[in-house]
Amino acid sequence: MSNPILQLKDASIYQGENLVLSDVNVEINKGEFVYLIGKTGTGKSSFMKTLYGDLPLNDGEGHIVDYDLKNLKEKDIPFLRRKLGVVFQDFKLLTDRTVNDNLLFVLKATGWKDKTDMKTRVEEVLTKVDMKTTGFKYPHELSGGEQQRIAIARALLNNPELILADEPTGNLDPQTSVEVMEVLQDINKNGNTILMATHDYALLLKYPSKTLKCDDNQVYEVVQRKG
């Protein structure tokens, strides 16, 4: 039985006044790993931003982790984002504090109170991305790949139902991209649903999975050839 975690039906996505994607019909089920591909400027980022409430959905229907995107109110957005883990291309770590403090900051901001629980959770997510010994370091002391692992750890803090990874390997060299991809694959195997925007076609070949493509104002599923 399918268990949709994300559904868009006849949705149109706008960036300001400009129509970026029209008649979008997408369904992602719990536990899937889905790629979102397409050339720069075809709407991948606008698609992602609509999913985490950065752009409003005005036309069509959209449901994500039990939220109705069409009727999403400003006050609901922080709660929606608690159920999503968002990983950005440029890490978005706070440079003035350590890795541990970056993660604690997110926990405090999302309503965690108990210091022991918070410390335990930070250790858990850092262990998941194989960065347990780096908590005392500052972001500038880490390589790009290490910073992205921390960004993934941050996305995992609140046990998200869906992880949105927007070009997570875009700033990384091929070897580091593979390492980050391995982390995402492991997380997916543990049951987290992942939607990953990328233009790194080498990763698609190495880790084939369901693929959506943005092209010509449309989003459609690409059937990958076997062999």
Image: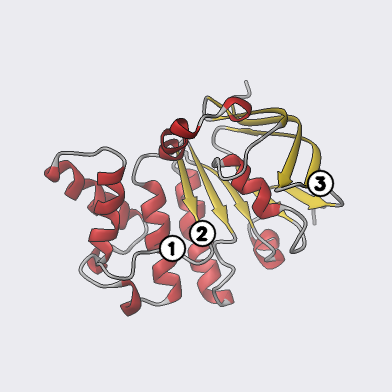
Q: Where is residue 218 drawn, in percent x and y?
A: 83, 45
Amino acid at circle 3: Val
Q: Kindly report which numbered mark, 3 or 1, lies closer to the viewer in this rendering.
A: 1
Tag 3 near tag 1, CB within 8 Å: no
Q: Amino acid at mark 1?
A: Lys
- Disc 1, disc 2: CB below 8 Å? yes
Residue 174 in view: yes
Residue at left 75%, top 61%?
Answer: 41
Q: Residues within 10 Å of mark 2 (few under 14, many from 20)?
A: many
Q: Find residue 3 and report its horizontal and vertical position in percent.
A: 59, 24
Could you tell me the amino acid type at mark 2? Answer: Phe
| Mark 3 and mark 1: Cα distance apart in space | 33 Å
Badge 1 density bin: few <14, some 14–19, many ≥20, Cα 10 Å: few
Residue sitting farthest toward the right: 216
Which of disc 3 and disc 2 is earlier in sequence? 2
Residue 132 lies, with reference to residue 64, above or below; the image says below
Residue 171 point in image, percent of width and height:
55, 73
Marks 1 and 2, how far apart in space? 7 Å
Rate crowding at label 3 as few (under 14), some (14 to 19) or many (20 or more) other CA atoms within 10 Å.
few
Q: Secondary structure at mark 3?
A: loop
Which numbered disc flags the more N-terminal residue, 3 or 1? Answer: 1
Q: Using the numbered discs, state the Cα–Cα distance from disc 2 to disc 3 in whole angstroms.
A: 26 Å
- At 51% from the left edge and 53% from the top edge, which residue is drawn? 185
Pick the quarter of the image with the C terminus: bottom right
Name the side, left or right, on which 49 lies relative to 123. Answer: right
Residue annotated with mark 1: 92
- Farthest-out residue, front: 17
- Above or below 218: residue 6: above
Of residues 80 and 189, which is closer to you in this image?
Answer: 80
Residue occupied by mark 2 = 88
Position of the N terminus by quadrant: top right
Whether the residues at callouts 2 and 3 have beta carbons within 8 Å, the answer is no
